[in-house]
Image (cartoon, rainbow, N blue to C red):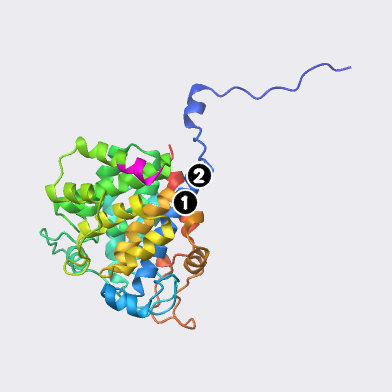
Amino acid sequence: MNHSKEPSSPALDKNDAEAAPRPIPAAVRSRARGCMLGQLSGDSLGSLVEFRSPEQIRAAYPHGVRELADGGTFHTLAGQPTDDSEMALAMARQIATLGRYCALRTGKQYRDWLKSHPFDCGNTIARALRGEPNPASQANGALMRISPMGIFGAGRPRADVMKWAKKDAALTHTHPICGQANALYAALIAHAVAEGGTGQECYAALLGWMKRMKLEDALRRAVENAAHEAPHDYMSQMGWVLIALQNALWQMLHAPSLEEGVVDTVMRGGDTDTNAAIAGALLGAIYGEDAVPAQWREAVLSCRPEKGREGVTQPRPELYWPVDAVELADALLEAGWK
């Protein structure tokens, strides 16, 4: 009788152990997906009423803007990204492909996006990508696209996330407020995805970082004011980065759910798609993918604005379709989870 034992698996040596990736908890993966889906859903929902006043929106939607639908300001499909999320998708695909953030390559992705003739593009971005940046602009075009950096950065040091977010802002928005807002928001998303916790707990972490940072006074006030008030006016300074940031933080602290936070943002008027994309990404990073309404998820993940397809009035290259948003969120998370 052979009493020899089956050979046991060799123990991992130190190098193998260091190379083995950390497992990603299901809750972390859910929050990463929620962030991506929140960005895309908020963008699409807000595009239905972009540039309208709160009074105009309430008259047209007395029960609130609650479903993704075809039409809107740019006659898009339900779930179709605008410039906000098309640029976010461009960044996300670059990071997922390369496995790291590279400002040089991402800048090329943005220039390629502009050459694709998007149906909308902010003035600050258009000028910068054509080599004529506006250093005075405090527009929200850098903040609107940075959420994928937060997903990627969930497994990285927060200081690195802030550094990369500032670099990305500088590609189009060189004003210090834009870079600093990017840094705080991306790090906040990374923290929410990785650590979980309530909006209040995430806000406390944010305030802790701010104590050690040199920030523009207006930015510091916007973050602190979010604890007790939303922005007063979403219309007269439409597109200002601090309206978008303060609103997102206000919703994080006070909205009863992701859906209600995004809907409330849209109902306030102004730059509704951008404000709702920024709020939606942050809320998704806190509440996770199941908090995104099923109708929103289904519209986003089935949206194919293909040229010649029935109902498509704004055809776009496949690179900017949102159908693989869940897989893309997973790829971003895995690329950064070291």
- In the picture, the disc for residue 288 is 1
Question: Does the residue at mark 2 contact the one at mark 1 (Cβ under 8 Å)?
Answer: yes
Coordinates of residue 194 in the picture (x, y in percent):
42, 41
Q: Look at 41% across and 45% down and name the residue there.
A: 193
Q: Is residue 302 above or below residue 338?
A: below
**Viewer-proximal residue among 153 and 79:** 79
| Magenta-colored span | 198-203
Q: Is residue 199 left or right of residue 135?
A: right
Task: Kindly tell me whether residue 131 is visible in this rendering.
Answer: yes
- In the picture, the disc for residue 27 is 2
Q: Is residue 187 left or right of residue 155?
A: left
Q: Is residue 200 magenta?
A: yes
Q: Is residue 209 above or below residue 278?
A: above
Q: Look at 43% across and 70% down and name the residue there.
A: 66
**Viewer-proximal residue among 52 and 6:** 52
Looking at the picture, which amino acid does disc 2 mark? Answer: Ala
Residue 215 occupies which quadrant of the picture? top left
- In the picture, the disc for residue 266 is none
Q: Secondary structure at mark 2?
A: helix
Q: Is residue 29 left or right of residue 204?
A: right
Q: Single out the residue that lies furthest toward the right.
A: 1
Question: How many neighbours does mark 2 have within 10 angstroms: few (below 14), some (14-19), or many (20 or more)?
Answer: some
Q: Determine the CA span between mark 2 and mark 1.
A: 8 Å
In the rendered image, the quadrant that contains the N terminus is top right
Q: Is residue 25 above or below residue 6?
A: below
Task: Kindly tell me whether residue 327 is visible in this rendering.
Answer: no
